[in-house]
Image (cartoon, grey):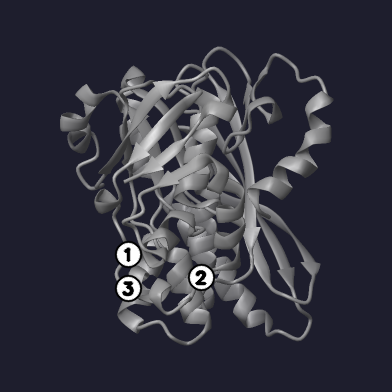
């Protein structure tokens, strides 16, 4: 569902009162809900599922699971357990589903959690994902709001997975490009999240880049923080082949919805071609963590996560009074 439609359907829920223990809920939409248990512990709860993005069932299960646990990491938490969410056609071999579940279970185990159950329904199209429970210290939660003018914007994974998986569906993707995208999507954000948590107060805001694309999730952070953002297009990390498939017209439907919703709030350099702009709207599956950090943290961020690469892709600009004044600039 696109950002505009989602905002519309959630609007009636905003009137329901929330208990004080609900630290993160619908009052300020974030990557997951957070509920305080006591002074040292808070529970994180999230869910995500979708149809196959690749043909290999094990890889699909792994990607869907990595995408679901990413919301736990975007909040700065650790994975405890997960529940399988499955929709499956009666006429599709159940051995395929076993492989999907095996891929998902492997990722959850790698994240330090366990598959503790699940729910299945019959559907015309296969779908898989997880409801995930995590844990975080109430004082160490990463949220979308809080970016400050002058902050640096960093990203933990390259972009372009939507373009490549769309090319794959059209049988246009080169195998090496597809495998690079699968490896990126199946890689969990645990170490990147741990690095941001270790950085403490130097990290002002964080989220992960998924279905709303880079600019969609940046817009969420910017509006909650009441700031503008400026991106340097040349600094954006791209998966191999992403621009090539944009040139071939392998644009996901979600990219058009993202563009339609965000265009009133975005200023893009006229020097960027339509092909190059496709990266900005591209819906990501299991994308990287995106954070606003103090400039002084940048030189040492790599030492906090030696096996993870962060890319510096932009800056936070001036503060504003309300979201009607928020603009994202891409040069």
Determine which residue is flagged by label 3: 241
Q: Secondary structure at mark 3?
A: loop
The numbered mark, 2 or 1, whose residue comes first in the sequence reads 1
Say whether residue 10 is left or right of residue 164: right
The picture places residue 300, in percent across and down from the top left corner, at: 17, 30
Say whether residue 171 is left or right of residue 8: left
Say whether residue 315 is left or right of residue 300: right
State which quadrant residue 252 falls in. Answer: bottom right
Q: Are marks 3 and 1 in contact (CB under 8 Å)?
A: yes
77 or 301: nearer the viewer = 301
67 or 227: nearer the viewer = 227
> Of the residues tagged 3 and 2, which is closer to the observer?
2
Q: CA distance from mark 2 to mark 1?
A: 15 Å
Q: CA distance from mark 3 to mark 2?
A: 13 Å
Residue drawn at (32%, 73%) of the image: 241
The picture places residue 212, in percent across and down from the top left corner, at: 55, 51
Q: CA distance from mark 3 to mark 1?
A: 6 Å
* As drawn, 226 above or below 30: above
Q: Secondary structure at mark 1?
A: loop
State which quadrant residue 256 falls in. Answer: bottom right
Residue drawn at (60%, 37%) of the image: 32
Determine which residue is flagged by label 2: 251
Q: Secondary structure at mark 2?
A: loop
């Amino acid at each position: 569902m696109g950002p505009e439609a989602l905002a519309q359907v959630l609007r009636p829920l905003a009137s329901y009162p929330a208990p004080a223990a609900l630290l993160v809920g619908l009052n300020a939409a974030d990557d997951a809900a957070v509920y305080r248990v006591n002074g040292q512990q808070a529970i994180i709860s999230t869910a995500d599922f979708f149809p196959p993005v690749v043909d290999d069932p094990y890889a699909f299960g792994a990607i869907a699971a990595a995408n679901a646990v990413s919301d736990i990491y975007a909040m700065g938490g650790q994975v405890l357990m997960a529940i399988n969410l499955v929709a499956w056609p009666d006429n599709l071999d159940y051995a395929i589903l076993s492989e999907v579940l095996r891929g998902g279970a492997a990722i959850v185990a790698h994240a330090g959690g366990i598959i503790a159950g699940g729910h299945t329904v019959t559907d015309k199209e296969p779908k898989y994902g997880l409801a995930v429970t995590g844990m975080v210290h109430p004082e160490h939660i990463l949220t979308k709001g809080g970016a400050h003018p002058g902050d640096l914007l960093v990203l933990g994974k390259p972009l372009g997975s939507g373009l490549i998986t769309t090319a794959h569906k059209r049988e246009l993707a080169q195998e090496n490009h597809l495998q690079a995208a699968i490896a990126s999507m199946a890689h969990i954000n645990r170490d990147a999240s741990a690095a941001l948590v270790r950085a403490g107060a130097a990290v002002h805001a964080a989220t992960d880049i998924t279905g709303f694309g880079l600019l969609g999730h940046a817009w969420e952070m910017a509006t909650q923080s009441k700031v503008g953002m400026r991106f340097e297009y040349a600094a954006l990390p791209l998966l191999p082949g992403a621009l090539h498939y944009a040139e071939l017209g392998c644009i996901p439907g979600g990219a058009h919805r993202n563009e339609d919703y965000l265009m009133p709030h975005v200023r893009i350099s006229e020097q960027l071609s339509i092909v190059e702009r496709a990266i900005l709207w591209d819906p990501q599956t299991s994308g990287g963590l995106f954070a606003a950090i103090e400039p002084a943290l940048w030189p040492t961020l790599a030492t906090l996560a030696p096996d993870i690469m962060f890319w510096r892709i932009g800056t936070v600009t001036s503060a504003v009074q309300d979201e009607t004044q928020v603009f994202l600039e891409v040069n």
